[in-house]
Each structure stands twice: as structure tokens, then as C-alpha cells.
Amino acid sequence: MNIRLSATAVAVAAAFPFVSTAFAADEPTGETVIVSANRIDTPDVAATYASEVHTRKDIERSGATSLVDYLNRQSSVQLTPNFGNRFTPSINMRGYGTNDGFQNVVISIDGRRLNNIDMVPQLVGSIPLEDIDRIEITKGSGSVAYGDGATAGSIQIYTKPRTGASIDVNAGNHEALGTTGYAGYVGERFTASATAEHTEDGGFSDKDPSGHRDASTSDNWRVSLTGRPIDRLKLTLDTGDARIDLRYPNSLTLAQFHDDPGMNTGRDYTHQFFRDGYWAVGAEYDFASNWRLTARHNDEDKRSEFLQFSFRTDSRYLSDDIALQYLGDALAVTTGVQTFDGERADGFSETTKKNEAMFVQGQYEMGRLTLSAGARREKVEYEYDPSFGSRLKDDKQLSSWDLGANYRIDDVLSVFGNYNASYQAPDIDRFFAFNPVTFETIFNGLIKPAKVRTVTLGFNHVLPTNRLKVGVFHADLNDEIYFNASTFSNTNIDKSHKYGLEVQDTWRISPVLTGVLNYSWTRALIDREDMGGGAFDGKELPGVPRNNVVLGLNVAVGDQGNLYVSHTWRSKTWAANDFDNNNAQRQRAYQSTDVAYRHRLNKVELYAAVSNLFNYKNGTWVRDDAIYPVDFERTWKVGAKLSF
């Protein structure tokens, strides 16, 4: 494997330790940050893989209105509306692109997997920010614990109950309204929490011919219960429901976008309805010293309906996770089995994708050195059962493994390396194809599982006034899965590779002033693609900006106030469908300056936020004269949160 990094990238990585040493102290006193992507809780400075953690404090100070908004403007992950849909966004992480990147990252909330079995992105917009305690972004690792699709990495979202109650009410321009209620209790033997959220906005674009704007309403609720009937046993119950009704705009030509990104082109907006209900039960039993048995079952029902087309799909996902853990002072090992049974019905057929996996993950500490290793074997089964016609069945056998090491040079500096093999099995929309001659569904013989090998090297430098994390990575890919819009087919890129640099830094400039930097530089290149007749060879994967920068400045205003100013910038790149890098129009750079202020008065917290302060006209270029407007004007909101 050849790791290719530019001289600039290497120089920046090498220079950062000397920048941060100017703020050195005898001993670090910073808050410990825990990561658990390999299902073993570890301080992030001792982890054997690259991670990015966002805490509850980070979320609150940002002024974000949704999880999508927060990840897009405060993290290294890039989220944009998927052809206008803000609730199921396109996701680009580590250079997998806005087209298909969402299938290369596993997203979970408290262990419940959000990924779908078809080409619909994760319903990230249904998760209330009020519930989130921590977001952990794992890069280039996680395939042993999460399996199918964790090629770029994983995003784990964790919730945490707290005692008390609160109600949050906010309003903004474009008829935006939001209400969130929370109640919780944390006791020695029992915890309970409940959240209900209602949001709506009147739309950002002009009315369509039917008289509607691109408006949306969202209603979510969640209840979580935990009990300890005896000291060694913990039981959990989690249930929730999300209902989303939205309209989203059509694409514009370049001239229309220049004239007015909020204009309507004489076509009705896409009208879609989502419903997502789930329940989950789990148990943890410490049956002996250092030994723990865990089990979790999830049952989820989903419905997606395009109302103007009278087209509806219903899905049901069943999953089970059973694991045995040994948690010793130096050695920790987790082994288990995971199953996932996904089915989608559309009134004409039922299509299923089933995953069955066994895995083992271990970590061993030898003084300053931490070593980790793991492996996974997974079977993926497909079945297509139409109301009329022939039933189709097939299966795939896939494997992944992970090796890592972290060495703590001293109390403030540690270095780490990780080598990960991962895979992505095709979803049901890619694995099955429609034959236009026979009008039958057939196997897509061109599509193969994608296989990726990723190397990540980095260091952590943590001081009382500065927390710095730097990493470089290189990924070799075989059969990267993509949709070729020119031939309207799902197929594979025979050979491709990605590499880049990632920097995170939090600097306490003074007792009242803190600076935040999150930067990533990424290259994603197509080495060989036979389906393109050589036209794609040596080209850049479209929809992957080379640079992504988030700059933040946090200011403490007295004892009660907090001001946060941030700026997000992503460099221009090729339009999403421009695989031969030959379109006349390119994806423009994305920019947004955001300001948020919060002020606490006893049990009342007042806040105000402005997004896209300078009215940047942002959009997503799919191809020439196919531009979906996004974040194209200034928005604001004001609100109050009352805690009991």
C-alpha cells in the first residue's frame, strides 16, 4: 500500500505540536473525553483509532436548530439536503461523496442502527437535539463492531437521562416554530425520561402552482426506562415515534439560481410523509467478577409516502445483539453475534436484506502502550418476492478486521495507528435491477460488495489550555459502489483511493475566550473504472470538497451569558454526477457564518441565533443547470427554556 500525502499536509501535521507547546503546563487538567466505538470505554487520548467527540456543552453553545444543522456546521462531516430533502440528508465523510457517502457510514443512536436497506439516507432529522448527550464520530474504523457499511467510519449518538423537567419554546423567520418538553428522573434503582418535540416552518421558497411552499412539520416523542432489580442486572426499555410531513423544492438552472434561489419554476414541490416508530428492550448482567452479558432487541416500523404520486413503501427492521464481555484491569474483550432482518413492501413485491454476523474485539494495556485487535464474519442474504413472477434469492459472505495501537509518550502527548479492513454490501435497490425488455426484476450482475482497507496515523496533544488532535489517512478501495447517472445504472468503480489530513483543536485563549478549529483536507481519486470506458480513470470523485473548515469563537459574557460565533467553509468541487470532471458548472464553495447567544437567569435560559449571517447563496450542484438551493439566505430564531 502506498500512502501519498502532499508536502503541505505533512508539514502542517508536523508543525502543530510546536504550536501547542507554547501553552504547556506541568500536568494536564483537561476534562477526560470517553470514546467507545469498539464497545470498550477508553479515554480518547488513549484510543487506537481516530475519533471526534461533541459534548452536550458543544451542542448547546452552537445555537443549532437540529442535529442535521449541528453536524453540517460544527463537525468534519458534511450534510446537505438530499435532492432538497432536509430530513434525510446526503452525507460525505472521508471522501465518499455526497451521492453515496451516506451508505459508507453507520449511524446509530444508543445502539439502534439508523441505516436503511434501500437507497434512502438515514432519517437524521427525526432525532431531537434535546435528547443528545454526546456524539462520537469514528473515522476509518468501527467495521468490527458495526459491520456492513462502516467503510468511512461510524457516528454514534448517545442519550442520557437527567432529573428534572424543562420546556423549550422558540420562533423564527419563515414562520418557524418549535416546542420541546422534557421530564426525567434518575434514582439509585430506576431512571425514566420522556421527550416530546414539535417543529414546523413555513418554507423558504415561493409558493408552487398548488399554493404550497416548501414547508414542513415534525412531531417526535421518545420514552426511556431503566431499572436495576438487583445490583448486577440492568434492564432497559426504549420506545419512540417520529412523523414528518414535508415539501421540498425542485432543481433550478444556473440563471434561475442567480436570479432568485427561492423562486418556483412552475412545478409542484415534492410532497413526502415519513413515519418511523420503534421499541427496544435490553439487559446487562454482571454474572461474575469482570464478566458481563448484554442483549438488545430492536423492532422498527417505517413508512415513506410520496403523496402526489400515490406511492408508498412500508418497511420493518428487526435486529438483535448479544455480547459477552470480559472487562479486566489490562485486558478487555467483547465477542458476540448480531442479526438484522430488513423487509420493504410496496404493494407489488416484498424485498428483504438479512445480515448475520459474529465478531470479537479485544484491547490490552501494557503500561503506556495500548493494543487492539478484532475480526468479524458476516453473511448477507437477499430475497425478492413479487406478487407475480419468479422469486429471486442470493447471499454474500464478507469479513472485516481491525488492528490498532496507541503509545502515550508522556502525560500530554500520545501517538496512534490503525489498520482497518471493511466492506459495504449492496442495498436492495442496487442488488436488484429492472429489465426494460422483459419488464422483470433481475439480479444486477454488475454490482459487487465494496471492500476497503484504511490506514490512519495520528497524535493527541492535550494541555490545560489546548486540546489538539491530528491524523492522516489513506484508503484503498476495490469495487466502490456508485450510481452512474449517465447510464442510469448502479455499478462499481473497479479501483479507487482516498487520502487526507484531519485537524481538531480547542484553545482556551483566556479565561473568557476559547477558539475552536475543525479542519479536513481530502482527496478522493478514481484509479480505474471500466464502465466509463476509461473516461473516469484518474478523475476525482465528484461531490468531495478538498477542504472543510469550521472555525469557532466562544466568549463568556459575565457569569450568565455565552456568545458563540462560527464560520463554516467548504471548497468548490465537481458536481455530484460529474464523474468525468467535464461539466461546465462546478459545485460552488459553501459558506455560512453563524452567531448564537445564550443567557441564564436562574431557571430560565434565553437564547437567540442567526444562521448564514451574511446571506451566502449556497446550493447543491447535481449537474449543469440542476441546482438545489440550500442555506441561501439569513435565518434567525429566538427562544426560552424553562427548567423545573
Image (tube, rainbow, N blue to C red):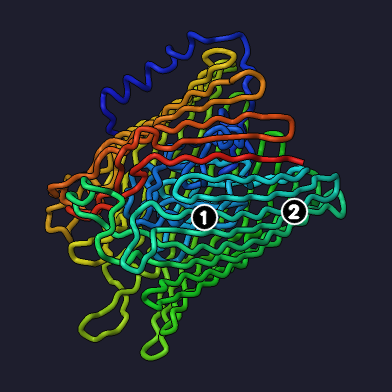
Question: Residue most toward the front?
Answer: 211
Q: On screen, 318 above or below 407?
A: below
Q: On screen, 464 above or below 384?
A: above
Q: Nearer the viewer, residue 540 or 126?
A: 126
Name the residue tied to disc 2. Answer: 284
- The part of the image, by quadrant, that contains residue 293 is bottom right
What kind of residue is marked 2? Glu
Q: How many marks?
A: 2
Circle 2 Cα neighbour tier, 10 Å, few/some/many (<14 / 14–19 / ≥20): some
What residue sits 26% from the left and 67% below the top?
446
What residue sits 36% from the left and 76% below the top?
309
Q: Is residue 440 visible?
A: yes
Q: Secondary structure at mark 2?
A: strand
Q: On screen, 644 above or below 628?
A: above
Please state the horizontal and vertical placement of residue 270, each as a whole percent of the image: 36, 65
Circle 1 Cα neighbour tier, 10 Å, few/some/many (<14 / 14–19 / ≥20): many
Please state the horizontal and vertical placement of residue 120, each as a whole percent of the image: 41, 62
Name the residue tied to disc 1. Answer: 200
